[in-house]
Image (cartoon, helix red, strand yellow):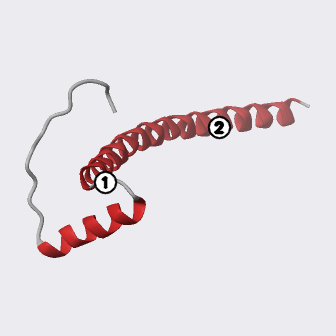
Amino acid sequence: MARGRLHTTTVRFDGDTWATIVAESDRLGIAHAEYIRGAVLRHVGRRDLEARVVVVERRLDAVSELVVAVTRILRSRLRLHKHGS
């Protein structure tokens, strides 16, 4: 989390959700606000992770295309070598 001033806001939860937040934060020994803040940060981190996965998938696609191209070149050269021997 970036250092600096924290912003205050109001968030509303239904009774069941609030009971879960209270139970989990009490179980962990942390403040309810800290529990909620942590959940938000995990959610944002997951979004960042999804974006990084997309980048990696694109790079893998590019590498795959290169492997296919190199394989074609090598097969072609092997054929030429066999016919030349």
Query: Which residue bears the numbered disc 1?
Result: 35
The residue furthest bottom is: 16
Residue name at image x 36 percent, y 48 percent: 46
The image quadrant of residue 1 is top left
Using residue 46 as the reference point, say whether residue 56 is left or right of it.
right
For marks 2 and 1, give the one nearer the viewer.
1
Q: Closer to the camera, 79 or 7? A: 7
Q: Are marks 2 and 1 in contact (CB under 8 Å)?
A: no
Identified by mark 2, the residue type is: Arg
Mark 1 Cα-neighbour bin, 10 Å: few <14, some 14–19, many ≥20:
some
Position above or below: 39 against 15:
above
Residue 4, image x, y percentages = 26, 24
Q: Closer to the camera, 77 or 71? A: 71
Question: Of helix, strand and loop, which one carries label 1?
Answer: helix
Residue name at image x 41 percent, y 60 percent: 28
Query: Which residue bears the numbered disc 2?
Result: 72
Residue 18, image x, y percentages = 19, 67
Residue name at image x 40 percent, y 43 percent: 49
Position above or below: 22 against 41:
below
Residue name at image x 12 percent, y 39 percent: 8
How many numbered marks, from 0 up?
2
Identified by mark 1, the residue type is: Tyr
Question: Of helix, strand and loop, which one carries label 2?
Answer: helix
| First in sequence: mark 2 vs mark 1 | 1
